[in-house]
Image: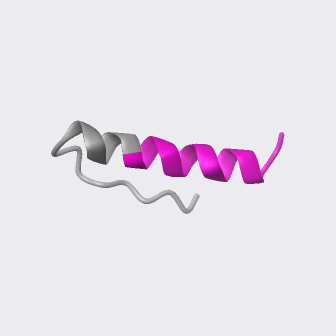
Amino acid sequence: MSVRKYKPTSPARRFMTVSTFEEITKKEPE
């Protein structure tokens, strides 16, 4: 998996990580 995990220092960082994961999921359908 090429998911970049940012340090959850702030809610924004966690949101960015989730957003990146969602993009990868959309590109790779089940």
Is 30 positioned to the left or the right of 16 in the image?
right
Is 7 positioned to the left or the right of 23 in the image?
left
Give the quarter of the figure containing the C terminus. Answer: top right
Q: Residue 10, image x and y in percent?
A: 18, 42
Numbered range of the magenta stretch:
16-30
Residue 23 forms part of the magenta stretch: yes
Which sits in the foreground, 21 or 12?
Answer: 12
Q: Residue 20, image x and y in percent?
A: 52, 52
Q: Residue 4, located in which quarter of the rendered image?
A: bottom left
Give the quarter of the figure containing the N terminus. Answer: bottom right
Residue 22 forms part of the magenta stretch: yes
Is 1 positioned to the left or the right of 15 in the image?
right
Is 25 positioned to the left or the right of 19 in the image?
right
Which residue is most to the right?
30
What type of secondary structure mainly makes up the magenta span? Answer: helix
Tell me which residue sits at (38%, 40%) in the image. 15
Q: Residue 17, image x and y in percent?
A: 41, 48
Q: Is residue 2 above or below residue 8?
A: below
Q: Is residue 30 above or below residue 3?
A: above
Which residue is most to the front?
12
Give the number of marks. Answer: 0
Tell me which residue sits at (23%, 44%) in the image. 8
Q: Residue 27, image x and y in percent?
A: 75, 53
Which residue is most to the left?
9
The image's colouring method is one colour
Tell me which residue sits at (55%, 62%) in the image. 2
